Amino acid sequence: MSNTPFTFASWNINSIRARAHHVQDWLERHPDCDLLCLQEIKCEDSQFPAAFAEAGLHVATSGQKAYNGVALIGRRPFTVTHHALPGFDHPSARYIEAELDGITIGNLYLPNGNSGGEDGYATKLAFFDALAERARVLLDAEKPFAFIGDFNVCPTDEDLAPGALSPDDALVRPETRAAFRRLEWTGLTDALRALRPAGRHYTFWDYQAAAFQRNSGLRIDHALLSPRLAERLTAFVIDRDERTKEKASDHVPVLVTV
DNA sequence: ATGACACCCGGAGGGTGA
């Protein structure tokens, strides 16, 4: 791990094929971003737009047909350490992990949990359990690391606009919030809250009912940092302006600098 | 109480999202 600034970002893109131009434009405007973590690419590995690799960027994907899927786009080469989350025995493509500059980055798309009844919700909790176990393994190995992505949880009532979700929604259920806290209690730091302990900062606005215009948003895109990374944290930026673009994703990018 | 919006696949309209 070097002492030069390192910036990594997360963006649930809601189909990379529908929004590749947004990502290309964004990367041009953010030359400081060393690694971009994408979620919901919604395509198989072979369908990921070739333009990024052709532009000299380094790309790794864990995709599947139609749904889910995560990807990494780096300015420099990196080493993929896992294409799936160890201990999460479910076929959906929701995790990819890489190491660069001595830092391990786990890019995740946590199950929403509102579909599939109680089994669907149990899958969400199972992902949390596997992620906490992964945290313990990386902590034991004394690896500086971050988990970043769409966690599909509003950790507290301050992390959603009043009335944006029903109280029994899987994103705010007490069991969901407890699972997020258990993950934090392995020793991880919520990067945004480390810098801004209070206040409403959203990363998602629904397409429906003019949610963005009413600022009826959610904070569900998070970065959790290991102790050695947390002490280096200097900035957390929510790129809210991206939500104003034509055919925008319903999530905006978040950037972490250490 | 319902639907609004957007993506996917497939070639109509249902599944999923949050």
Image (spheres, rainbow, N blue to C red):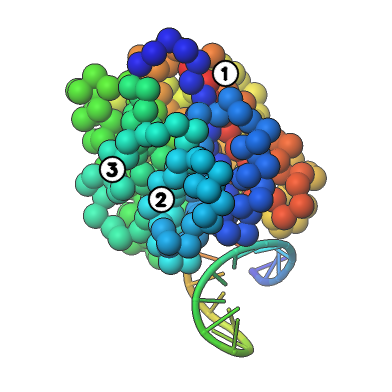
Chain under disc 3? A
Q: Inspect this view and state whether residue A89 appears.
A: yes
Residue displayed at 68% across by 42% down: A25
Q: Name the residue under label 2.
A: A61
How far across and down, in percent of the image, does residue A139 sit? 25, 23
Determine whether the residue tagged by mark 3 lies in a helix, strand or loop. strand
Q: Inspect this view and state whether residue A162 appears.
A: no
Earlier-in-chain disc, 3 versus 2: 2
Q: Mark 1 points at which residue?
A: A235
Q: For the residues tagged 2 and 1, is the chain the same?
A: yes
Which of the labelled discs sits on residue A82, or is there none? 3
Query: Dot 1, crowdedness within 10 Å: few (<14), some or many (≥20)?
Result: some
Residue displayed at 33% across by 31% down: A99
Q: For the residues tagged 3 and 2, is the chain the same?
A: yes
Earlier-in-chain disc, 3 versus 1: 3
Q: How far apart are marks 3 and 1 (CA)?
A: 27 Å
Tag 2 near tag 1, CB within 8 Å: no
Q: What residue type is labelled 2?
A: Thr
Determine whether the residue tagged by mark 2 lies in a helix, strand or loop. strand
Chain under disc 2? A
Q: For the residues tagged 3 and 1, is the chain the same?
A: yes
Residue A254 in which image quadrant: top right
Chain under disc 1? A
Q: Is residue A131 left or right of residue A254?
A: left
